[in-house]
Image (tube, helix red, strand yellow):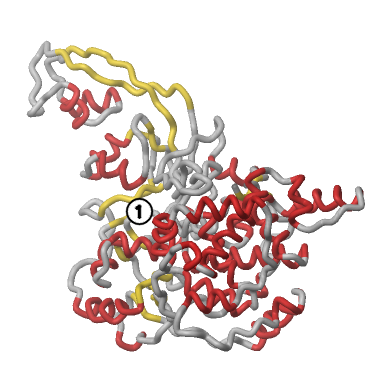
Amino acid sequence: MKRFRLSTPSILTAALLAGLAPQICLADALPPVFSLVSAPETTNAAQTASQAASQELPADVANFDYTDKTTDLWDRVRAGYAIPDLENQLVANQLAWYGTRTEYILRTVQRGSRYLYHVVEELEKRGMPTELALLPFIESAFNPQAISTAKATGMWQFMAATGRDFNLKQTMFKDDRRGVIDSTDAALNYLEKLYGMFGDWQLALAAYNWGEGSVQRAIKKQQALGLPIDFQSLSVHMPNETKNYLPKLQAVKNIIGHPEQFNLALPRLDNQPYFVTVEKTRDIDVRVAAQLAELSIDEFKALNPQFSRPVITGSSSTKILLPTDNAALYKANLNKWQGPLSSWSAHTVQKTERIESLASKLGLKPEVVREVNLIPAKMMIKAGSTLLVPKSDKTPDHDISLEIAEKAQIVIEKTATRQVSYKVSKHDNLAGIAKRFRVSVAELKTWNHLKRENLAHGQTLHIQTPVVTQVNQTNILASAGGRHAAQTPKIVHHSVAPARHGKTLLANLKASKKKHS
Protein backbone atom coordinates (compact mmCIF):
# COMPACT_ATOMS: atom_id res chain seq x y z
CA MET A 1 0.00 0.00 0.00
CA LYS A 2 1.15 3.54 -0.68
CA ARG A 3 0.66 6.54 1.52
CA PHE A 4 1.77 10.00 0.52
CA ARG A 5 3.07 13.04 2.36
CA LEU A 6 0.32 15.05 3.94
CA SER A 7 -0.09 18.61 2.77
CA THR A 8 -0.76 19.81 6.33
CA PRO A 9 1.01 17.67 8.94
CA SER A 10 -0.62 16.97 12.29
CA ILE A 11 -4.00 18.38 11.27
CA LEU A 12 -5.73 16.85 14.26
CA THR A 13 -3.27 17.86 16.95
CA ALA A 14 -6.20 19.51 18.70
CA ALA A 15 -7.56 16.02 19.31
CA LEU A 16 -4.44 14.77 21.13
CA LEU A 17 -5.40 13.28 24.46
CA ALA A 18 -4.15 14.56 27.79
CA GLY A 19 -3.76 11.04 29.22
CA LEU A 20 -2.71 8.41 26.70
CA ALA A 21 -2.63 5.33 28.91
CA PRO A 22 -4.13 4.00 32.13
CA GLN A 23 -1.95 5.42 34.87
CA ILE A 24 -1.51 5.21 38.64
CA CYS A 25 0.14 7.54 41.09
CA LEU A 26 2.95 6.14 43.23
CA ALA A 27 5.43 8.95 42.67
CA ASP A 28 5.93 9.85 46.32
CA ALA A 29 7.44 6.46 47.14
CA LEU A 30 9.87 6.30 44.21
CA PRO A 31 13.52 7.39 43.90
CA PRO A 32 14.20 10.13 41.33
CA VAL A 33 14.97 7.66 38.52
CA PHE A 34 11.37 6.82 37.67
CA SER A 35 7.94 7.78 38.85
CA LEU A 36 4.58 6.31 38.05
CA VAL A 37 2.51 9.23 36.83
CA SER A 38 -1.16 9.97 37.14
CA ALA A 39 -3.20 11.30 34.25
CA PRO A 40 -3.01 15.10 34.00
CA GLU A 41 -6.18 17.13 34.28
CA THR A 42 -7.54 18.50 31.03
CA THR A 43 -7.09 22.27 30.78
CA ASN A 44 -9.78 24.60 29.55
CA ALA A 45 -7.75 25.17 26.38
CA ALA A 46 -7.46 21.44 25.79
CA GLN A 47 -11.19 21.00 26.35
CA THR A 48 -11.94 23.78 23.89
CA ALA A 49 -9.59 22.22 21.31
CA SER A 50 -11.16 18.81 21.82
CA GLN A 51 -14.65 20.26 21.35
CA ALA A 52 -13.53 22.06 18.21
CA ALA A 53 -12.03 18.86 16.82
CA SER A 54 -15.22 16.91 17.49
CA GLN A 55 -17.28 19.60 15.77
CA GLU A 56 -15.24 19.08 12.59
CA LEU A 57 -16.40 15.46 12.42
CA PRO A 58 -19.86 14.34 11.29
CA ALA A 59 -22.29 14.12 14.19
CA ASP A 60 -22.75 10.36 13.99
CA VAL A 61 -19.11 9.80 14.91
CA ALA A 62 -19.21 11.86 18.08
CA ASN A 63 -22.48 10.45 19.47
CA PHE A 64 -21.70 6.76 20.04
CA ASP A 65 -22.71 5.66 23.54
CA TYR A 66 -20.06 3.58 25.29
CA THR A 67 -21.33 3.96 28.84
CA ASP A 68 -22.25 0.29 29.14
CA LYS A 69 -18.81 -1.24 29.62
CA THR A 70 -19.06 -4.98 30.11
CA THR A 71 -16.57 -7.20 31.90
CA ASP A 72 -15.45 -8.79 28.63
CA LEU A 73 -13.37 -6.62 26.29
CA TRP A 74 -14.63 -8.53 23.25
CA ASP A 75 -18.22 -7.55 24.08
CA ARG A 76 -17.09 -3.96 24.37
CA VAL A 77 -15.47 -4.13 20.93
CA ARG A 78 -18.57 -5.67 19.34
CA ALA A 79 -20.85 -3.10 20.95
CA GLY A 80 -18.99 -0.28 19.21
CA TYR A 81 -19.12 -1.65 15.66
CA ALA A 82 -20.31 1.28 13.53
CA ILE A 83 -18.80 0.99 10.04
CA PRO A 84 -21.36 -0.27 7.48
CA ASP A 85 -20.78 -3.91 6.60
CA LEU A 86 -19.29 -4.78 3.24
CA GLU A 87 -20.62 -7.88 1.48
CA ASN A 88 -19.00 -9.14 -1.70
CA GLN A 89 -16.93 -12.01 -3.04
CA LEU A 90 -13.69 -10.52 -1.76
CA VAL A 91 -15.07 -10.60 1.79
CA ALA A 92 -16.12 -14.22 1.27
CA ASN A 93 -12.61 -15.05 0.06
CA GLN A 94 -11.02 -13.44 3.12
CA LEU A 95 -13.45 -15.20 5.45
CA ALA A 96 -12.48 -18.49 3.85
CA TRP A 97 -8.79 -17.70 4.36
CA TYR A 98 -9.05 -16.61 7.99
CA GLY A 99 -11.70 -19.20 8.81
CA THR A 100 -9.28 -22.04 8.10
CA ARG A 101 -6.43 -20.48 10.07
CA THR A 102 -7.66 -20.38 13.63
CA GLU A 103 -4.14 -20.90 15.02
CA TYR A 104 -2.95 -17.77 13.23
CA ILE A 105 -5.92 -15.82 14.59
CA LEU A 106 -5.26 -17.01 18.14
CA ARG A 107 -1.56 -16.12 17.91
CA THR A 108 -2.45 -12.65 16.71
CA VAL A 109 -5.06 -12.25 19.45
CA GLN A 110 -2.53 -13.36 22.06
CA ARG A 111 -0.03 -10.79 20.82
CA GLY A 112 -2.65 -8.06 20.59
CA SER A 113 -4.10 -8.73 24.04
CA ARG A 114 -1.43 -6.44 25.51
CA TYR A 115 -2.56 -3.48 23.43
CA LEU A 116 -6.26 -3.96 22.65
CA TYR A 117 -7.69 -2.35 25.79
CA HIS A 118 -5.65 0.80 25.23
CA VAL A 119 -6.72 1.05 21.58
CA VAL A 120 -10.40 0.56 22.45
CA GLU A 121 -10.16 3.19 25.19
CA GLU A 122 -8.70 5.73 22.78
CA LEU A 123 -11.31 4.99 20.13
CA GLU A 124 -14.14 5.46 22.62
CA LYS A 125 -12.69 8.74 23.88
CA ARG A 126 -12.79 10.03 20.32
CA GLY A 127 -16.18 8.52 19.47
CA MET A 128 -14.71 6.34 16.72
CA PRO A 129 -15.97 2.89 15.60
CA THR A 130 -14.39 0.17 17.72
CA GLU A 131 -13.76 -2.22 14.82
CA LEU A 132 -10.85 0.11 14.04
CA ALA A 133 -9.17 -1.57 17.03
CA LEU A 134 -8.87 -4.63 14.77
CA LEU A 135 -6.98 -2.74 12.05
CA PRO A 136 -3.53 -3.73 13.43
CA PHE A 137 -4.70 -7.30 12.84
CA ILE A 138 -4.50 -6.47 9.11
CA GLU A 139 -1.56 -4.08 9.20
CA SER A 140 0.94 -5.99 11.32
CA ALA A 141 -0.74 -8.91 13.09
CA PHE A 142 -0.41 -6.71 16.21
CA ASN A 143 3.36 -6.91 16.01
CA PRO A 144 4.97 -3.53 16.85
CA GLN A 145 8.26 -4.80 15.38
CA ALA A 146 6.74 -5.48 11.95
CA ILE A 147 8.60 -3.82 9.06
CA SER A 148 7.53 -3.68 5.42
CA THR A 149 9.73 -3.77 2.34
CA ALA A 150 9.00 -0.06 1.98
CA LYS A 151 10.13 0.29 5.63
CA ALA A 152 6.71 1.05 7.03
CA THR A 153 7.16 0.24 10.70
CA GLY A 154 5.22 -0.67 13.79
CA MET A 155 1.80 -1.93 14.76
CA TRP A 156 0.11 0.72 12.59
CA GLN A 157 2.74 0.61 9.81
CA PHE A 158 3.89 4.20 9.50
CA MET A 159 6.44 5.28 6.94
CA ALA A 160 9.18 7.56 8.25
CA ALA A 161 7.85 10.78 6.71
CA THR A 162 4.23 10.11 7.73
CA GLY A 163 5.43 9.39 11.23
CA ARG A 164 7.22 12.72 11.43
CA ASP A 165 4.07 14.47 10.16
CA PHE A 166 2.26 12.99 13.16
CA ASN A 167 5.00 13.79 15.69
CA LEU A 168 6.50 10.28 15.83
CA LYS A 169 10.19 10.89 16.57
CA GLN A 170 12.76 8.62 14.95
CA THR A 171 16.26 8.85 16.40
CA MET A 172 19.25 6.61 16.86
CA PHE A 173 17.92 5.59 20.27
CA LYS A 174 14.17 5.22 19.67
CA ASP A 175 11.51 5.02 16.99
CA ASP A 176 8.10 6.19 18.14
CA ARG A 177 6.46 4.44 15.17
CA ARG A 178 6.91 1.29 17.23
CA GLY A 179 5.75 2.78 20.51
CA VAL A 180 2.33 1.51 21.55
CA ILE A 181 0.94 4.79 22.89
CA ASP A 182 2.48 7.23 20.43
CA SER A 183 1.78 5.22 17.29
CA THR A 184 -1.82 4.53 18.32
CA ASP A 185 -2.42 8.21 18.95
CA ALA A 186 -0.89 9.09 15.57
CA ALA A 187 -2.87 6.42 13.71
CA LEU A 188 -6.18 7.58 15.20
CA ASN A 189 -5.31 11.19 14.38
CA TYR A 190 -4.64 10.14 10.80
CA LEU A 191 -7.87 8.13 10.55
CA GLU A 192 -9.86 11.03 12.00
CA LYS A 193 -8.33 13.34 9.43
CA LEU A 194 -9.20 10.97 6.59
CA TYR A 195 -12.77 10.57 7.82
CA GLY A 196 -13.06 14.34 7.97
CA MET A 197 -11.94 14.48 4.33
CA PHE A 198 -14.26 11.80 2.94
CA GLY A 199 -17.11 11.57 5.46
CA ASP A 200 -17.07 7.78 5.04
CA TRP A 201 -15.14 5.26 7.12
CA GLN A 202 -14.76 2.81 4.25
CA LEU A 203 -13.14 5.48 2.08
CA ALA A 204 -11.06 6.67 5.03
CA LEU A 205 -9.67 3.14 5.38
CA ALA A 206 -9.00 2.95 1.65
CA ALA A 207 -7.07 6.21 1.95
CA TYR A 208 -5.13 4.89 4.96
CA ASN A 209 -3.95 2.06 2.76
CA TRP A 210 -3.76 3.73 -0.67
CA GLY A 211 -3.23 7.40 0.14
CA GLU A 212 -5.75 10.21 0.27
CA GLY A 213 -4.59 11.59 -3.07
CA SER A 214 -5.28 8.29 -4.80
CA VAL A 215 -8.79 8.11 -3.35
CA GLN A 216 -9.50 11.72 -4.32
CA ARG A 217 -8.44 11.06 -7.90
CA ALA A 218 -10.60 7.94 -8.08
CA ILE A 219 -13.58 9.93 -6.79
CA LYS A 220 -13.06 12.59 -9.48
CA LYS A 221 -12.98 9.91 -12.19
CA GLN A 222 -16.22 8.41 -10.94
CA GLN A 223 -17.91 11.80 -10.66
CA ALA A 224 -16.86 12.72 -14.19
CA LEU A 225 -18.64 9.56 -15.40
CA GLY A 226 -21.67 10.17 -13.20
CA LEU A 227 -20.98 6.99 -11.21
CA PRO A 228 -21.27 6.29 -7.44
CA ILE A 229 -18.32 7.03 -5.19
CA ASP A 230 -18.76 4.40 -2.46
CA PHE A 231 -15.92 2.00 -1.66
CA GLN A 232 -17.26 -0.86 -3.76
CA SER A 233 -17.81 1.37 -6.79
CA LEU A 234 -14.39 3.00 -6.45
CA SER A 235 -12.63 -0.36 -6.10
CA VAL A 236 -12.46 -0.67 -9.88
CA HIS A 237 -9.69 1.95 -9.73
CA MET A 238 -7.85 0.41 -6.77
CA PRO A 239 -4.80 -1.85 -6.73
CA ASN A 240 -5.49 -5.38 -5.50
CA GLU A 241 -4.04 -4.69 -2.06
CA THR A 242 -6.47 -1.85 -1.43
CA LYS A 243 -9.38 -3.78 -2.95
CA ASN A 244 -8.74 -6.48 -0.34
CA TYR A 245 -7.89 -4.14 2.55
CA LEU A 246 -11.43 -3.45 3.75
CA PRO A 247 -12.58 -7.04 2.97
CA LYS A 248 -9.82 -8.29 5.29
CA LEU A 249 -10.99 -6.02 8.08
CA GLN A 250 -14.59 -7.04 7.43
CA ALA A 251 -13.63 -10.70 7.64
CA VAL A 252 -11.84 -10.24 10.97
CA LYS A 253 -14.75 -8.13 12.22
CA ASN A 254 -17.19 -10.94 11.33
CA ILE A 255 -15.05 -13.58 13.02
CA ILE A 256 -14.64 -11.55 16.22
CA GLY A 257 -18.35 -10.74 16.11
CA HIS A 258 -19.46 -14.38 15.87
CA PRO A 259 -16.49 -16.66 16.64
CA GLU A 260 -18.79 -19.63 17.27
CA GLN A 261 -19.74 -19.66 13.58
CA PHE A 262 -16.09 -20.36 12.76
CA ASN A 263 -15.49 -22.98 15.49
CA LEU A 264 -13.26 -20.47 17.25
CA ALA A 265 -13.03 -20.03 21.01
CA LEU A 266 -11.59 -16.58 21.66
CA PRO A 267 -9.65 -16.26 24.91
CA ARG A 268 -11.37 -14.04 27.44
CA LEU A 269 -9.87 -10.54 27.65
CA ASP A 270 -10.54 -8.64 30.85
CA ASN A 271 -11.99 -5.18 30.37
CA GLN A 272 -9.21 -3.47 32.29
CA PRO A 273 -5.80 -1.91 31.56
CA TYR A 274 -2.95 -4.26 30.74
CA PHE A 275 -0.23 -1.69 31.39
CA VAL A 276 0.53 1.58 33.16
CA THR A 277 2.95 4.32 32.13
CA VAL A 278 6.16 4.96 34.08
CA GLU A 279 7.91 8.29 33.74
CA LYS A 280 11.69 8.10 33.35
CA THR A 281 14.14 10.74 34.60
CA ARG A 282 17.48 8.89 34.37
CA ASP A 283 19.19 6.59 31.88
CA ILE A 284 18.50 2.93 32.55
CA ASP A 285 19.46 -0.26 30.73
CA VAL A 286 16.65 -2.25 29.19
CA ARG A 287 18.02 -5.27 31.04
CA VAL A 288 17.93 -3.48 34.40
CA ALA A 289 14.44 -2.08 33.87
CA ALA A 290 13.12 -5.53 32.99
CA GLN A 291 14.86 -7.02 36.02
CA LEU A 292 13.38 -4.43 38.37
CA ALA A 293 9.91 -5.08 36.98
CA GLU A 294 10.50 -8.85 37.21
CA LEU A 295 9.74 -9.26 33.52
CA SER A 296 11.52 -11.21 30.82
CA ILE A 297 13.41 -9.11 28.28
CA ASP A 298 10.95 -10.26 25.59
CA GLU A 299 7.91 -9.15 27.58
CA PHE A 300 9.51 -5.80 28.44
CA LYS A 301 10.36 -5.18 24.78
CA ALA A 302 6.86 -6.19 23.70
CA LEU A 303 5.53 -3.25 25.72
CA ASN A 304 8.43 -0.93 24.89
CA PRO A 305 9.45 -1.79 21.32
CA GLN A 306 10.34 1.81 20.45
CA PHE A 307 13.71 1.64 22.19
CA SER A 308 16.35 0.68 19.64
CA ARG A 309 19.40 0.40 21.88
CA PRO A 310 20.13 -1.47 25.13
CA VAL A 311 19.84 1.76 27.13
CA ILE A 312 16.73 3.94 27.49
CA THR A 313 17.73 7.60 27.28
CA GLY A 314 15.88 10.89 27.36
CA SER A 315 14.22 13.19 29.85
CA SER A 316 11.15 12.89 32.04
CA SER A 317 9.04 13.01 28.87
CA THR A 318 10.30 9.51 28.06
CA LYS A 319 7.99 6.86 29.45
CA ILE A 320 8.08 3.09 29.68
CA LEU A 321 5.12 0.74 29.95
CA LEU A 322 4.78 -1.99 32.56
CA PRO A 323 2.01 -4.50 33.20
CA THR A 324 -0.29 -3.23 35.92
CA ASP A 325 0.64 -6.06 38.30
CA ASN A 326 4.37 -5.41 37.86
CA ALA A 327 4.31 -1.69 38.67
CA ALA A 328 4.39 -2.26 42.43
CA LEU A 329 7.16 -4.85 42.04
CA TYR A 330 9.17 -2.37 40.03
CA LYS A 331 8.73 0.30 42.69
CA ALA A 332 9.82 -1.99 45.53
CA ASN A 333 12.83 -3.36 43.65
CA LEU A 334 13.96 0.10 42.56
CA ASN A 335 13.97 1.28 46.18
CA LYS A 336 16.34 -1.58 47.05
CA TRP A 337 18.54 -1.40 43.92
CA GLN A 338 22.24 -0.84 44.72
CA GLY A 339 23.94 -1.33 41.36
CA PRO A 340 24.39 1.06 38.42
CA LEU A 341 21.24 1.78 36.42
CA SER A 342 23.01 2.33 33.11
CA SER A 343 26.16 0.72 31.73
CA TRP A 344 26.26 2.65 28.43
CA SER A 345 27.73 5.96 27.37
CA ALA A 346 27.86 7.99 24.15
CA HIS A 347 31.19 8.54 22.37
CA THR A 348 31.68 11.14 19.64
CA VAL A 349 34.12 10.02 16.95
CA GLN A 350 36.83 12.65 16.43
CA LYS A 351 38.28 11.35 13.17
CA THR A 352 37.27 8.88 10.49
CA GLU A 353 38.68 5.48 11.39
CA ARG A 354 38.08 1.75 11.51
CA ILE A 355 36.07 0.16 14.28
CA GLU A 356 39.02 -2.02 15.25
CA SER A 357 41.24 1.00 15.80
CA LEU A 358 38.59 2.92 17.68
CA ALA A 359 37.68 -0.05 19.86
CA SER A 360 41.34 -0.59 20.73
CA LYS A 361 41.65 3.02 21.94
CA LEU A 362 38.58 2.61 24.11
CA GLY A 363 39.67 -0.75 25.47
CA LEU A 364 36.70 -2.53 23.90
CA LYS A 365 36.16 -5.50 21.63
CA PRO A 366 35.34 -4.47 18.03
CA GLU A 367 32.46 -6.97 17.88
CA VAL A 368 30.76 -5.26 20.84
CA VAL A 369 30.93 -1.83 19.19
CA ARG A 370 29.70 -3.19 15.87
CA GLU A 371 26.82 -5.15 17.32
CA VAL A 372 25.33 -2.50 19.59
CA ASN A 373 25.65 0.19 16.90
CA LEU A 374 24.48 -2.03 14.02
CA ILE A 375 27.59 -1.43 11.97
CA PRO A 376 28.43 -4.00 9.28
CA ALA A 377 31.93 -5.25 8.58
CA LYS A 378 34.34 -3.32 6.35
CA MET A 379 32.90 0.03 7.31
CA MET A 380 34.78 3.05 8.65
CA ILE A 381 33.12 5.46 11.07
CA LYS A 382 33.04 9.07 9.92
CA ALA A 383 34.16 11.90 12.18
CA GLY A 384 31.27 13.43 14.12
CA SER A 385 29.38 10.17 14.46
CA THR A 386 28.04 9.14 17.86
CA LEU A 387 28.61 5.59 19.06
CA LEU A 388 27.04 3.82 22.00
CA VAL A 389 29.83 2.22 24.04
CA PRO A 390 30.02 0.43 27.40
CA LYS A 391 31.04 2.67 30.27
CA SER A 392 34.64 2.22 31.34
CA ASP A 393 37.54 4.13 32.86
CA LYS A 394 37.98 5.85 29.50
CA THR A 395 34.36 6.99 29.14
CA PRO A 396 32.46 9.47 31.33
CA ASP A 397 30.13 8.00 33.93
CA HIS A 398 27.08 10.19 33.39
CA ASP A 399 23.78 10.08 31.56
CA ILE A 400 23.61 10.60 27.82
CA SER A 401 22.45 14.17 27.24
CA LEU A 402 19.05 14.93 25.77
CA GLU A 403 20.70 16.72 22.84
CA ILE A 404 22.75 13.66 21.94
CA ALA A 405 19.78 11.34 22.43
CA GLU A 406 17.70 13.35 19.96
CA LYS A 407 20.34 14.35 17.39
CA ALA A 408 22.95 11.57 17.41
CA GLN A 409 23.61 9.77 14.17
CA ILE A 410 26.14 7.32 12.78
CA VAL A 411 27.73 8.03 9.42
CA ILE A 412 29.87 5.34 7.84
CA GLU A 413 31.86 4.86 4.67
CA LYS A 414 32.61 1.65 2.91
CA THR A 415 36.23 0.60 2.63
CA ALA A 416 38.24 -2.06 0.88
CA THR A 417 41.62 -3.41 1.96
CA ARG A 418 44.75 -4.54 0.24
CA GLN A 419 47.37 -6.75 1.82
CA VAL A 420 50.92 -5.55 1.97
CA SER A 421 54.03 -7.21 3.34
CA TYR A 422 56.38 -5.29 5.60
CA LYS A 423 59.86 -6.39 6.69
CA VAL A 424 60.65 -5.42 10.26
CA SER A 425 63.75 -3.23 10.68
CA LYS A 426 66.05 -3.09 13.65
CA HIS A 427 64.27 -0.29 15.53
CA ASP A 428 60.68 -1.17 14.66
CA ASN A 429 57.99 -2.00 17.17
CA LEU A 430 54.32 -2.94 16.77
CA ALA A 431 52.98 0.42 17.96
CA GLY A 432 55.09 2.34 15.45
CA ILE A 433 54.16 0.05 12.56
CA ALA A 434 50.48 0.24 13.47
CA LYS A 435 50.61 4.04 13.52
CA ARG A 436 52.42 4.15 10.16
CA PHE A 437 49.79 1.99 8.45
CA ARG A 438 46.83 3.45 10.39
CA VAL A 439 45.79 0.17 11.91
CA SER A 440 45.70 -1.06 15.51
CA VAL A 441 48.23 -3.17 17.38
CA ALA A 442 45.48 -5.71 18.01
CA GLU A 443 44.87 -6.03 14.28
CA LEU A 444 48.56 -6.55 13.57
CA LYS A 445 48.70 -9.30 16.17
CA THR A 446 45.58 -10.97 14.77
CA TRP A 447 46.71 -10.87 11.14
CA ASN A 448 50.13 -12.29 11.99
CA HIS A 449 49.11 -14.71 14.77
CA LEU A 450 51.33 -12.91 17.30
CA LYS A 451 50.91 -13.73 20.97
CA ARG A 452 53.39 -11.11 22.12
CA GLU A 453 54.45 -7.68 20.94
CA ASN A 454 58.12 -8.57 20.49
CA LEU A 455 59.34 -8.49 16.88
CA ALA A 456 62.41 -10.02 15.29
CA HIS A 457 64.67 -8.06 12.93
CA GLY A 458 63.90 -9.14 9.36
CA GLN A 459 60.51 -10.62 10.29
CA THR A 460 57.78 -10.16 7.65
CA LEU A 461 54.40 -8.80 8.72
CA HIS A 462 51.21 -9.04 6.66
CA ILE A 463 49.08 -5.90 6.93
CA GLN A 464 45.57 -5.17 5.66
CA THR A 465 45.67 -1.49 4.73
CA PRO A 466 42.37 0.34 4.24
CA VAL A 467 41.57 1.72 0.80
CA VAL A 468 38.49 3.90 0.48
CA THR A 469 36.71 2.81 -2.70
CA GLN A 470 33.26 4.35 -2.29
CA VAL A 471 31.67 6.73 0.16
CA ASN A 472 28.19 5.87 1.38
CA GLN A 473 27.04 8.13 4.17
CA THR A 474 24.25 6.43 6.03
CA ASN A 475 22.24 6.93 9.14
CA ILE A 476 21.99 3.74 11.09
CA LEU A 477 18.23 3.70 11.58
CA ALA A 478 16.35 1.72 14.15
CA SER A 479 14.61 -0.26 11.45
CA ALA A 480 15.12 -1.69 8.00
CA GLY A 481 14.14 -4.89 6.30
CA GLY A 482 11.47 -6.79 4.45
CA ARG A 483 7.75 -6.20 4.03
CA HIS A 484 5.56 -8.49 6.07
CA ALA A 485 3.49 -10.75 3.85
CA ALA A 486 -0.09 -9.77 3.18
CA GLN A 487 -1.47 -12.37 5.57
CA THR A 488 1.46 -13.53 7.69
CA PRO A 489 3.88 -10.74 8.64
CA LYS A 490 7.58 -11.45 8.30
CA ILE A 491 9.54 -9.61 10.93
CA VAL A 492 12.97 -8.39 9.87
CA HIS A 493 15.47 -7.18 12.42
CA HIS A 494 17.90 -4.28 12.32
CA SER A 495 20.16 -3.76 9.33
CA VAL A 496 21.83 -0.90 7.48
CA ALA A 497 20.20 0.67 4.45
CA PRO A 498 22.65 2.32 2.01
CA ALA A 499 22.07 5.85 0.75
CA ARG A 500 23.09 7.52 -2.50
CA HIS A 501 26.67 8.73 -2.89
CA GLY A 502 27.30 11.77 -0.74
CA LYS A 503 23.81 11.78 0.80
CA THR A 504 22.65 10.55 4.14
CA LEU A 505 19.79 8.11 4.30
CA LEU A 506 17.92 10.65 6.40
CA ALA A 507 18.12 13.21 3.59
CA ASN A 508 16.86 10.65 1.09
CA LEU A 509 13.92 9.76 3.31
CA LYS A 510 12.98 13.41 3.68
CA ALA A 511 12.95 13.75 -0.10
CA SER A 512 10.73 10.73 -0.52
CA LYS A 513 7.09 11.28 -1.42
CA LYS A 514 5.88 7.87 -0.33
CA LYS A 515 4.40 7.63 3.12
CA HIS A 516 3.02 4.17 3.85
CA SER A 517 3.27 0.76 2.32
Q: Quadrant of residue 476?
A: top left
Q: Is residue 413 left or right of residue 8?
A: left
The answer to whether residue 4 is above or below residue 273 is above
212 or 230: nearer the eye? 230
| Tag 1 residue | 346
Residue in the picture at 61% in, 54% down: 92
Residue 323 shows in the view? yes
Residue in the picture at 59% in, 84% down: 66
Residue 303: percent from left, percent from top: 39, 65
Residue 404 shows in the view? no
Q: What is the number of callouts on the image? A: 1
Q: Is residue 286 left or right of residue 3?
A: left
Q: Quadrant of residue 196?
A: bottom right
243 or 35: nearer the eye? 243
Residue type at mark 1 is Ala
Q: Secondary structure at mark 1?
A: strand
Residue in the picture at 36% in, 79% down: 35
Residue 201: percent from left, percent from top: 70, 65
Residue 270: percent from left, percent from top: 41, 79
Q: Quadrant of residue 306?
A: bottom left
Alpha-carbon neighbours of circle 1 within 10 Å: few (<14), some, or many (≥20)?
many
Residue 140: percent from left, percent from top: 50, 54
483 or 130: nearer the eye? 130
282 or 174: nearer the eye? 174
Q: Is residue 48 left or right of residue 406?
A: right
